[in-house]
Amino acid sequence: MALLKNGRLIQDRWTTVDTLTDALKPGGVLVPLDLWLAERETLRGKSAVGVILPNDADLSALADDYERIAAIVLTFPSMVDGRAFSQARLIRERFGFDGEIRARGPVIADQYLYLLRCGVDAVEVPDDTNVETWSHNARRFSTVYQPAADDRIPAYRRRHLGIQTAIAS
Amino acid sequence: MYVYDELDRGLVEDRVEEFRDQVRRRISGELTEEQFRPLRLMNGLYLQLHAYMLRVAVPYGVLSSVQMRKLARIARVYDRGYGHFTTRQNIQFNWPKLEETPDLLAELAEVEMHAIQTSGNCIRNTTADQFAGAAADELEDPRIWCEIIRQWSTFHPEFTFLPRKFKIAVTGAVSDRAAIKVHDIGIVLVQGETGETGFEIWAGGGLGRTPMIAKKIRDFLPAADLLSYLEAMLRVYNRFGRRDNKYKARIKILVHEIGADTYRDAVEAEWADIRHGALALPDQEIRRIRDAFAPPAFAALPVSSTGFEARKFEDRAFARWVATNVRRHKAPGYAIANISLKPVGGIPGDATAEQMDAVAGYADRWSFGEIRVAHEQNLVLPHVRQDDLYDLWLALGSVELDTPNIGTIGDIIACPGMDYCSLATARSIPVAQQISERFADLDRLHDIGSVSLNISGCINACGHHHVGNIGILGVDKKGEEFYQITLGGQADENAAIGRIIGPGFPADEIVGAIETIIETYLSVRQDGEAFIATLNRLGQTPFKEKLYGTA
C-alpha cells in the first residue's frame, strides 16, 4: 500500500504493529486503540505514535491524548460504511486534532472529496493508484453547500460576501 | 419558485460531468459493479427487472412548466413515451440506457434539474405539502425550508454513506398532507410565542418491514437553528444507527431500540456543541430564499365567482370533478386544481409525454407556470382562478386527465410491483387496475366518498399500504400471489398504522374482498361519516364478519 497525501503518492513510513514490544522499536508506529489505552503512559514517551480507531470508538476516550498523538487511522470496513466520516469531523472540529488523519479501507476516488472535507488528509491506497483520478475528484465541485472540517465557504455564505470574495474563493 | 444562481448551476453541471466520468470508468472496467453501484444509486440509477430505471428529483414536488416540458422530451427521447410519478414526488423513467444517462442528466441540468440523491443511503429528496404556498390552512410556505434543507443535504460529506436511506418531510399547514409522521425526520412549521417561525421536530417514523409512527423530539426549534439541529440528528444516527442488518438500519429502529428520550438527549448534547457554529443561517440567506417563494401576482378577486358557481349548477360532470379534485386556496377567487393520474384501469402515477406537455401548457395559461407532484402520485395546478376552472377541466378532458376521483377509492397509491421491480413478490398494478374498474361508476365512487387505498407488492411497502385506510400487501405464498388486507391506516396528522384484518386473499378474490369491505361500510356508516371514521367508531369486527363469516 502507498499513501495518498497532498495530491501525491508517497511511501508510507508508518508501520502498523499490535504489541508493545514492536511499538517501542524505532520509527513511526500505528497502534490499535486498545493497546494505546492500555499502555499510553509508556507510549507517550515515543514521539511518532499513531492510533488506529475502530469506527465505533468512543472519541472522548482519547480526549487527553489528541495533543500527543501524531496520527489517527480511521477505519472503513467497506466503502459504504460511513461512520468514520463523522469521526473525522469530530476529531478535527471538536477535539482540534491537527495531526494526520488517514483513511484505511476500500474507499475509492469518488469519495475523496468527502474524505477531505471531513478532515481526512491521507488515504491508504494500492500502489498502482491513478493519482490523477483522485485529484480530479477532489477538485470536481465548484460549490459546496455546507460547512465541514475544511475551509471551503458554503454557498449560503459565499452568496452574501460580495462578488470579489466569491471569485477569490 | 426557487431559481438557481451561478453556484447552484455550477454544482449541477459538475455533477453531470462526474457521473459521465463514472459511467465511462464503469464501462472501461476501471470501476467494478460493486464500486459503481452506490455511485449510480446516488444518482438515482437502479438496475430493475428489465432495464435501468432513472429516478429524477423533483425537489419538494415543485415543477415549472419549462421543467415539465423537459420531462416530456426525456420521456420521448430516452424512454418509451411516458414517465412515472412516485410517492416521493419524483419521476421515474423505466427504460434509459446506461450510456445515455449522462446526456439525459445534461438535458435535465439545462432546466435546473438532476437525479442527485434520489437513491442510495443518503439524504433523499425532501418532500412537502403539494399545496405549499396555496393551501388555505397554511401557516407558512414549507418550500422555503425544504430548499434550505435541499442545499444543506446535497453532497453532504459526512452523511453520504449513512446506515440507510434518509427521508425528511416538511409541512406548514394544519392538515398534514406530507405524511411527516412516517418519515425519518418530520418537520412541522409552528409559531413561537411572539409569532416567530419555528419547527416541531419528529423522528423515527417510517414504513417498510417495521412500520412506525415518528416520536416527537422537540416542541419548538428556532428557525435559524434548523440546520445545526438536523446535523446533530443525522450525526447521532450515522454514528449509532445499526449497520449489521439493512432491515434494521433505518433511524426508526435506532429511536425504537434506545428510546426517544435517549435519542433526544444524544441529539441535544451534540447540538449544544455545534448550535452556534457555521451552520447558523445568515438572515440574508433566509430572506433570499423566502423571496424566491413569494406568492405570484394574484389578481384581487371576490372570494367566490358567480360564473364558476353557475357552471357547477349547469354541468353535473364539472361539479363532480370540482367536488373531488378542487381544493380551497388561500387567495380569494383562486382554487387548487388536482389532476388525477389514476384513470380507470390505468397505472397509478403514469403520464404520457403528450399529457406532460399538455399540463405544462395549462400551467402557463392558468397557474402561473407552476405544477406540483403529490405524494399520492397525482399532479396539481396550485393557483387557478375559479373562473378558469371550467376551461381547465375541458382541456384536461381532451388529454384524459379529468378523472374526478381524488381522495376516493379510485385514487390508489401503488408501487410498481412485480411488473417492474426486482424486489417485488406480487403484482400491484393489475390489482390497482381491477379495483379502479370495479369502482368505475362515478355515482357509486362519490357516494363512497373519501377513502385511501394503498397497495404494496412486497413487505418493503413502497406503496405505503400500512397507512392506507385500506392497505393491500402482496406476498408470495408457495409461488402464488396472496394479498393481505390492513384496515385503519392514516398518513395525515392522525397518522396510524393499519392492522391486518385476517388471512390474505388470492389474486382472483382480492377485488371482491375490497368490495365487501366497502359494502359493509356503506351499510353501517352514519350520515356524512367517512370510511375511516366509521372504522374507528366500530372497529374491525363488522368488516371481519362480512369477510370471513361469524364463525
Image (cartoon, rainbow, N blue to C red):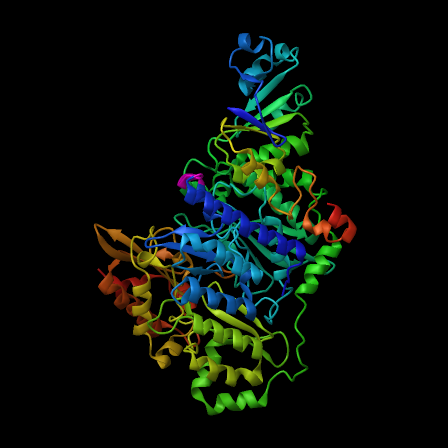
Report the number of discs: 0
- Picture layout, residue B70 above or below residue A57: below
Q: x%, y% of residue B100?
A: 44, 55
Q: What stretch of residues is rendered in magenta? A: B30-35
Residue at point 40%, 43% (across, down) = B247
Viewer-closest of B394 and B410: B394
- Picture layout, residue B118 above or below residue A135: below
Viewport quadrant of the C terminus of chain B: bottom left
Viewer-closest of B546 and B216: B216
Viewport quadrant of the N terminus of chain B: bottom right
Which image quadrant is residue B30 in?
A: top left
Viewer-closest of A126 and B466: A126
Which image quadrant is residue B303 in?
A: bottom right
Q: Is residue B48 magenta?
A: no
A31 with respect to B437 (left or right): right
- Picture layout, residue B167 above or below residue B264: below
Residue at point 55%, 63% (across, down) = B129
Q: Is residue B31 magenta?
A: yes
Residue at point 44%, 73% (across, down) = B354
Q: x%, y% of residue B301?
A: 65, 83
Q: x%, y% of residue B86?
A: 44, 61
Q: Is residue B473 visible?
A: no
Q: x%, y% of residue A44?
A: 65, 13
- Picture layout, residue B291 above or below residue B250: below
B241 with respect to B1 (left or right): left
Q: Is residue B208 visible?
A: yes
